[in-house]
Amino acid sequence: DTGVSQDPRHKITKRGQNVTFRCDPISEHNRLYWYRQTLGQGPEFLTYFQNEAQLEKSRLLSDRFSAERPKGSFSTLEIQRTEQGDSAMYLCASSSTSAETQYFGPGTRLLVL
Amino acid sequence: AQSVTQLGSHVSVSEGALVLLRCNYSSSVPPYLFWYVQYPNQGLQLLLKYTTGATLVKGINGFEAEFKKSETSFHLTKPSAHMSDAAEYFCAVSPGGYSTLTFGKGTMLLVSP
């Protein structure tokens, strides 16, 4: 059990550029969640998958954001045409359907200049 | 809908003193409640959780929390603070457990020697 991993850990980009983050969940966890955490706030839910199906999306997930989990294993979160307001820590978590605990990765910190 | 309120964005204690971090929740269904800790530039680590059954739950590093339904509270305590406890603490609620988490804004615990 190697835990949830995220890549990259840090990303600096210019406004208007596209960025993509990757999350590898704990193996055999079929639920995967994305959260966003801004400075001074708690994490806020963005979206979650059960296997490859995206079951729920938050209103925070504008049409510039897209998430995929094509084979039910790793997931990617893409932000198109980044804005300065997208600067945040993006957290991934995973869980099994038989357990309620979500395990978090170290996060990807995005800075949009 | 769910919500979490954490009283006090910052709590300062002396090493060896009692730690008390407050959390009140709102949930339309029986809640599952969680406390997570976050160290700088890291993801969230689960401290403890309440699902059903015993209302006093014990977690890692000597922390415990008590679920009080009548007060809609789930306060986190530790009898004696240690310098290594300095971190940010988040309370979270999940409706029925197998769903997305709603977090409070967090409480930064500062421990002085």
Image (spheres, coloured by chain):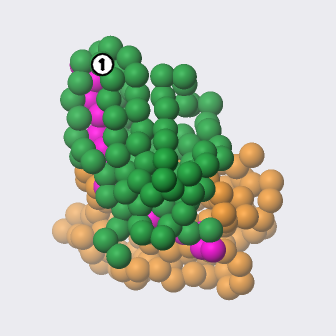
Chain colours: A green, B orange
Callout 1: residue from which chain?
Answer: A
Inspect the magenta stretch and tell me whether residue A110 lies in it. yes
Image quarter of residue B75: bottom right
> In which quadrant of the rendered image does the C terminus of chain B lie?
bottom left
Q: In the depicted view, which residue is nearer to us: B63 or A109?
A: A109
> Can I make out residue B74 in this image?
no
Q: Is residue B53 above or below residue A35?
A: below
- The part of the chain drawn in magenta is A98-113
Q: Which residue is mark 1?
A: A17
Residue B20, percent across and down? 47, 67
Along the line of sight, which residue is nearer the eye, A19 or A10? A19
Q: Number of callouts in the render?
A: 1
Local crowd at mark 1 within 10 Å, few (<14), some, or many (≥20)?
Answer: few
**Viewer can see residue A60:** yes
* Residue drawn at the location 56% of the way across and 51% of the way down: A52
Residue drawn at (27%, 48%) of the image: A7
Residue at image coords 71%, 78%: B52
Q: Label 1's element? A: loop
Whether residue A71 sits left or right of residue A89 in the image: it is right
